């Protein structure tokens, strides 16, 4: 939400923030709030990393359900804005699952995608097919490293 608020403030006129639970983070169930160190020792961790389409979080949702939820929400949002642009802010696994879907990539390969914090990915949804225009663009905050000559 903080990232979405920052994006909205930069637009003229300022955008109205709308929260859509459909693009929310994975429901981790019993894993919620636990450290990665704790979770990485569990058998399910390997499934999440190597066979995510077969992973379900205890008392939470599966990664496949999350992907379906997110894609459905994005397509609903797009249908409400047929001639405009919409900024959607989400967590990296949610974005990676969405990008994998629109790339035609099996969900089990979504961990190969990199989505950096505050990066920008642009997907254009058309009647013919989706287009991934930009993925993981960090040029708005990545600065060139100085060379020895500078």
Image (cartoon, grey):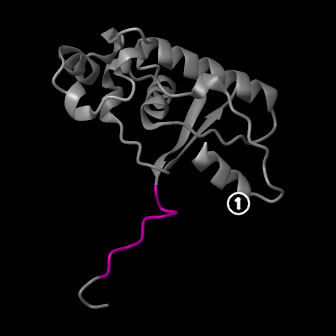
Return the x and y of residue 8 as percentages of the image width and height.
71, 51
Return the x and y of residue 83 as percentages of the image width and height.
81, 37
Q: Nearer the viewer, residue 65 or 135?
A: 65
Residue reaching furthest to the bottom: 149
Q: Which residue is at 53% across, 14% downward?
A: 68
Q: Quadrant of residue 36?
A: top left
The C terminus lies in quadrant: bottom left
Look at the image and give the residue range highlighted in magenta: 138-146
Residue designated by label 1 = 10
Q: Quadrant of residue 28?
A: top left
145 falls in the magenta region: yes
Q: Which residue is at 41% across, 8% downward?
A: 59
The N terminus lies in quadrant: top right
| Residue 128 in view of the camera | no
Q: Nearer the viewer, residue 14 or 27?
A: 27
Q: Regarding mark 1 in the picture, which secondary structure is present there?
A: helix
Instruction: Left or right? Give the position of 62 relative to 6.
Output: left
Return the x and y of residue 51 as percentages of the image width and height.
26, 16
| Residue 67 in view of the camera | yes
Q: Nearer the viewer, residue 22 or 108?
A: 22
């Amino acid at each position: 939400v903080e990232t979405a608020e920052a994006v909205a403030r930069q637009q003229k006129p300022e955008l109205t923030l709308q929260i859509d639970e459909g693009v929310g983070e994975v429901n981790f169930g019993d894993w919620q709030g636990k450290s990665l160190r704790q979770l990485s020792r569990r058998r399910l961790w390997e499934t999440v990393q190597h066979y995510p389409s077969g992973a379900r979080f205890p008392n939470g949702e599966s990664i496949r359900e999350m992907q379906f939820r997110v894609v459905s929400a994005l397509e609903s949002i797009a249908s409400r804005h047929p001639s405009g642009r919409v900024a959607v802010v989400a967590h990296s696994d949610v974005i990676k699952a969405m990008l994998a879907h629109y790339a035609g990539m099996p969900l089990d390969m979504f961990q190969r995608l990199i989505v950096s914090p505050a990066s920008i990915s642009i997907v254009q949804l058309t009647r013919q097919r989706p287009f991934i225009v930009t993925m993981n663009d960090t040029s708005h905050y990545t600065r060139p490293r100085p060379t020895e000559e500078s």
